[in-house]
Image (cartoon, rainbow, N blue to C red):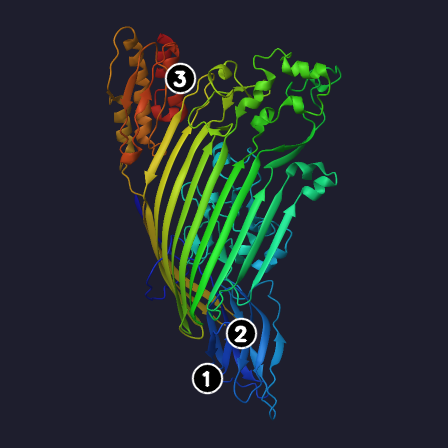
Amino acid sequence: MRHILVRLAVGCIVLSVAYLARPGTVAAQTGKITGVVRDSTSNQPLEGVEVYIEGTGVAVNTASNGRYFLISVPPGVYTLVARRPGYRSTAVRGVSVVIDVTREQNFNLTQAQGVTLAAVQIQAEAQPLVEPGVSSSAVGISGDVIRALPVVSIEGALRLQQGFLQVPANTDIISFNESRRDVTSPIRIRGGRAGETVTLIDGIPVNNWIFGGPAISPSLESVQQLTYIKGGMEPQYGNALSGILNIASRDGGTDLAGAVHIQSTSPGGALGNRQDELQNYTQLEGFLSGPIPNTSNKLRFMVSGRQTRGADQVLEFDNRVTVPSDPTSAFYARPFPSNYMDAFPGWRAFGYNNERQLFGKLTYFLKPQMKLGFTVFDDQQQRLPFDFGFLLTYGNPLNSPAIKTLADSEAYWGNRFGERVGTLEFTKVVQGSIDAGRRLIVARLDHNLGRTSYSVAVGRFSLNRTTCNWFQGVCLGSTFADPNFTDDQFISGLSGTCAVNPVCGTDRYYGGEKLRTIVTRGDINSQVSDHHNVQAGVMAMFHKVSLNAYESPGFVNTFISDQFTYAATPWDGALYLQDRIEYDFLTVKLGGRFDLGSAGGNFWRQPGPQLRRYVGGGVPRRTRRPAGPGRARLREADRVVRRLRAVEEAAPVFPAHRCELPVGRGVGSVLQLRPQHAEPAARQPVLVHGHRDGPRRDAVRHAAVHVTRLGDSVLRQPQSLDRANDQL
């Protein structure tokens, strides 16, 4: 389905032409320095003064009014020098440049006396708490400040800012499906959803375009500057409703530098802190940067890495546990006894969260005002999230410090509690773990021509995520085993499941998504006059996405496997134009943006009449028709599946579906669904498999419950399913 979005910002549009490209979100990665150079005696502006950034070769000359402009300056802290024959040169140290911010630095030059030519050294004023001329709600944080904070991630630094929330790992807040697909905790800006926030690295978006939210969290050593925008976004930013995280990666310097940092909870554990001991957290992070020898400092490198390992969560529980041999234990307390599997007191560790990230950047300065950069991010992460529903399956009760006597061990070993499921079979219930790989490759050219600069970037972002139930090093795939629930509604093994499956129960989810995004972008920035800074850009983003997931609806004592598949190649592009009008007392930003995108596929223009027609008819194609008494029962199942077909074709959120239903002894049928909106690769047959010992009565019941779960409001007549079930 194609859509065109035209967004006008404030007021007029300044006409200009831009060329080249980038993604659905375009973002500046530079700032600007401006000011006026005057004679310290007469206070008159000086023309022809050379103002340059020390160590970069970037220089400009002042105009007749003494004003200079250094545009498209990468974020960082610089030394700014002004010099002119007959005057003592003046150097201002500590000039901070922030993304999308104009920094004003004025000079007062003193005439040289005799042969005295020593430079005047001045310390720049501290960065103001409130940036003048900034119309958006934005905060710029330098990499040095982030690394000085007692945090281990950029999210930790952003938690200190208003409006930013990293959702805690709590399944009461995060949905089940979200907890099974995200290796990183979702973020929220100003209460918006994850998909309403865009994260950019060197101008390239690194979002999960299928489910939303950021996909990469760069290491602290790889960040040059982070800009957090939570409102009033300029037209150059698109596809962001709640906020933007704009990250500029670190360049290599002219001097060889490096550092290694190790953070661990092991010392705390060795000193007796039980929480630190169980957390078992270790983070190793470091970087190395500098020039490549024999290149006259023109070719520079920057590499950094981070590896973290530790438990997903460490929680403290009370000491009210079950001790079978102790009649005063909580298990014998009435009317609120403890669960017989509640045997672990105090601190406990759950799951794991391991990550390895590598960052590399190579920069070649073709000339001082022109550089070519090549950046690579590679991130691999594995996580087993803590789920409170699986609490009783974490750990063997025989390993509990509360189980000390032979009688206690005998109670658990021999299942003396009278339960249908052996107490030692709880540990054979498998929870799904997540394996995700992310990679970003960027090539970028930046050229500064004085009052005009342009940049061109091409990037490729890929994501590959799989969630699977792992047992003894083997991924069980879509082979599910139905678990059970205890009286406390905790997940446990199901009686009889262990006899026919390698495990006594599994999680409900298997599969994942693959994403590949090709991004091209181009931006032009021109200081057309002392008060007008015009920016323009064109961008394009091409996706290739696919989803292949299996999920169980969780029926009682029956495991039905639903397969959801989706494949598409959407694209989107945009162009923007904006004018930043700056005076000493006023800053006005005017601009406009045009977005165009296509997701592909087909759908009804008026789905209402089509839905009513398909609910009333449309017998699916059957490849094999059974004979004998099974025909009548299969006819009832076919009637239910016709409803499923109607729901399937009416709801684009289910582009393809696969379910397995028992339909009776020796009976089987293959039913083909052809949803009009799905891609050809996503069309899957609905398979109805027969089981020799499967109860015929359950065939329609399970199908009816399954279809009603997808949306009984769409079926219009769900009571007919009950009547069909009652007739059997």
Alpha-carbon span between mark 3 and mark 2 = 74 Å
Frontmost residue, 713 versus 108: 108
From this view, report whether residue 292 is shown above or below residue 379: below
Amino acid marked by disc 2: Glu
- Whether the residues at callouts 3 and 2 have beta carbons within 8 Å, the answer is no
- Name the element at disc 1: loop
Residue lying at 62% horizontally and 52% vertically, measured from the top left: 261
Marks 2, 1: nearer the viewer = 2
- Name the element at disc 3: helix
Q: Which residue is tagged 3?
A: 702
Marks 3, 2: nearer the viewer = 2
Amino acid marked by disc 1: Ser
Can you tell which mark lies on residue 64? 1
First-in-chain label (1 vs 3): 1
- Other residues around mark 2 within 10 Å, as few (<14) / some (14–19) / many (≥20): some
Asked if residue 678 can be seen in this view, the reply is no
First-in-chain label (2 vs 1): 2
Q: Which residue is tagged 2?
A: 54
Asked if residue 531 can be seen in this view, the reply is yes
Amino acid marked by disc 3: His
From this view, report whether residue 545 is shown above or below residue 485: below
Using residue 723 as the reference point, say whether residue 391 is left or right of it: right
First-in-chain label (3 vs 2): 2
